Image (cartoon, rainbow, N blue to C red):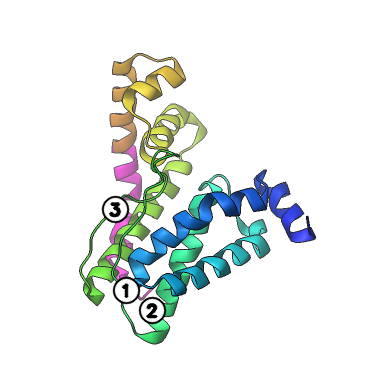
């Protein structure tokens, strides 16, 4: 194990070779939805793993799981390459079934600049909403907890109730109230993202 691999394991708690073997083919499948070119997808995937290995100190475990971060790095690399070459890939997002949907579900989009930009705008809005959830103060901890479990970890209401040892009606009530808080807290930021569009970020 070299220095970079040791550092990766120190930061993430995951052996890099194990991580690579588990997610490489998933990442290729994901990227093929964009590129329609397996060889290109393999090149991007290899570079994404290298970047994650080199820049693991930038990984924030409070915002995402390690494999989600990997897929984000690869997606951003693909978008940058498309912009550099002025070539639009068709978009197909992946869902990690094993880890209960921490990535996006399959979403078909047309081959047009407008559709890719619309997807990127939705992704940024989603990321901003997640930031608002994580930013909830300690006094709203119960809402923060159920929202993370529901909106980010994609747990069902029943699973959340069992996990937190709460009755189902309490879980539903807290999620409803938490969503109201997030809608209020995120309104201005979402409007700003919509107004500025993709190219301003």
Mark 1 vs 2, N-terminal side: 2
| Residue 192, percent from left and from top | 32, 63
Q: Residues within 10 Å of mark 3 (few under 14, many from 20)?
A: few
Query: Is 88 on the left or on the right of 44, as rendered?
Result: left
Q: Are marks 1 and 2 in contact (CB under 8 Å)?
A: yes
172 w.r.t. 36: above or below? above
Alpha carbons under labels 3 and 1: distance apart: 15 Å
Find the magenta span and give its range: 180-200
Q: Residues within 10 Å of mark 1 (few under 14, many from 20)?
A: many
Per the image, the residue denoted by label 2 is 82
109 w.r.t. 7: above or below? below
Q: Quadrant of residue 161?
A: top left
Q: Residue at x 42, y 84 (%)?
A: 84
Q: Which mark is residue 89?
A: 1
Magenta stretch contains residue 184: yes
Find numbered disc 3 in the image and state the secondary structure of the residue it sits on: loop
């Amino acid at each position: 194990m070299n220095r970079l691999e040791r550092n990766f394991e120190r930061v993430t708690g995951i052996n890099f070779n194990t991580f690579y073997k588990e997610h490489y083919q998933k990442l290729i499948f994901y990227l093929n939805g964009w590129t329609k070119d397996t060889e290109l997808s393999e090149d991007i995937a290899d570079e994404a793993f290298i970047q994650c290995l080199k820049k693991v100190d930038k990984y924030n475990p409070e915002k995402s799981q390690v494999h989600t971060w990997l897929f984000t790095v690869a997606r951003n690399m693909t978008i940058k390459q498309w912009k550099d070459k002025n070539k639009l890939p068709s978009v197909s997002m992946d869902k990690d079934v094993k880890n209960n949907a921490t990535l996006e579900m399959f979403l078909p989009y047309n081959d047009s600049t407008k559709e890719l930009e619309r997807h990127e705008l939705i992704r940024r809005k989603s990321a901003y909403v997640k930031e608002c959830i994580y930013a909830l103060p300690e006094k709203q901890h119960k809402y923060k907890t159920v929202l993370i479990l529901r909106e980010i970890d994609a747990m069902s209401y029943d699973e959340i109730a069992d996990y937190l040892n709460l009755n189902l009606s309490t879980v539903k009530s807290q999620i409803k109230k938490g969503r109201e808080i997030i809608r209020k807290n995120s309104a201005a930021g979402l409007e700003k993202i919509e107004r500025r569009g993709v190219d301003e970020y």
